[in-house]
Amino acid sequence: MDGTGDSVDMLRPDGHAASLIDVASDRLWDRGWRGIVLDLDNTCCAYHQPELADGVAAWVATARDRGFRIVMVSNNFSERVAAAGAQLGVATVPNALKPLPFGFLRALRLLGTPRRATVVIGDQVFTDVLGGKLLGLRTVLTEPLVAHDFPLTRVLRFLERLVYKRTPPVPGLPIFRGED
Ligand SMILES: [Mg+2]
């Protein structure tokens, strides 16, 4: 795909990282971004795992210390999302129906940050990237923590492969094209 055209741009993240903990939050801050919308499944937790992945709690604590406002927005059910949010000390929006705008709009109200200064970080093109782009938010795509997914997510990943060619990033490499 050549990356031209509005419809393709709606599916193209601003940045791409191997995982959440590979996203250098100081780079986000340097761009003037102040709000973070975090995905849960396969971004902070592996599929069907109750525990946060290694390093996620520390990453969130560092970002918050830097001054970021952070909200978790998930299509998963309330109890699972609330438990993860409580562990991280962040507000949550469960049952968000991403990429529809309602959950993201609620997150923006909780964050109080402008759309262009708010970044969605998640592992799916059709929920996290498209949903963020539809509202004019910034987006960073991560690789899924594990290859297992919900049945609906498996369908979305099939569609994703048709329209978006992922080049898996190397851990530790820059998340934005053209950066050092
Ligand atoms: Mg996800």
Image (cartoon, rainbow, N blue to C red):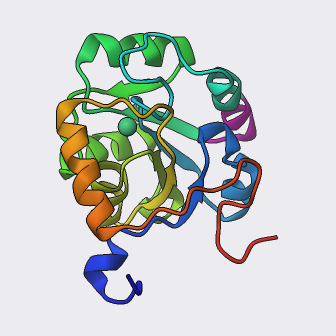
| Residue positioned 72% across, 47% down in the render | 171
Residue 163: % across, % down: 29, 69
Q: Main secondary structure of the magenta part?
A: helix
Q: Please, is residue 75 above or below residue 155 in the view?
A: above
- Quadrant of the image containing the C terminus: bottom right
| Residue positioned 25% across, 53% down in the render | 158
Q: Please, is residue 23 above or below residue 134 in the view?
A: above
**Magenta residues?**
62-68
Asked if residue 130 is among those painted magenta in the image, a careful observer would answer no
| Residue positioned 24% across, 29% down in the render | 150
| Residue positioned 73% across, 57% down in the render | 27
Q: Please, is residue 44 above or below residue 35 in the view?
A: above
Residue 131: % across, % down: 28, 55
- Quadrant of the image containing the N terminus: bottom left
Figure quarter occupied by ligand 1: top left
Compared across the picture, whether 168 is left or right of 8 comes to: right
Q: Please, is residue 172 above or below residue 14 in the view?
A: above
Compared across the picture, whether 16 is left or right of 5 comes to: right
Residue 148: % across, % down: 36, 29
Hey, which residue is sitting farthest right in the picture? 180
From the viewer's side, name the closer residue of 12 and 143: 143
Compared across the picture, whether 112 is left or right of 25 comes to: left
Count of labels in the image: 0
Q: Quadrant of residue 89?
A: top right
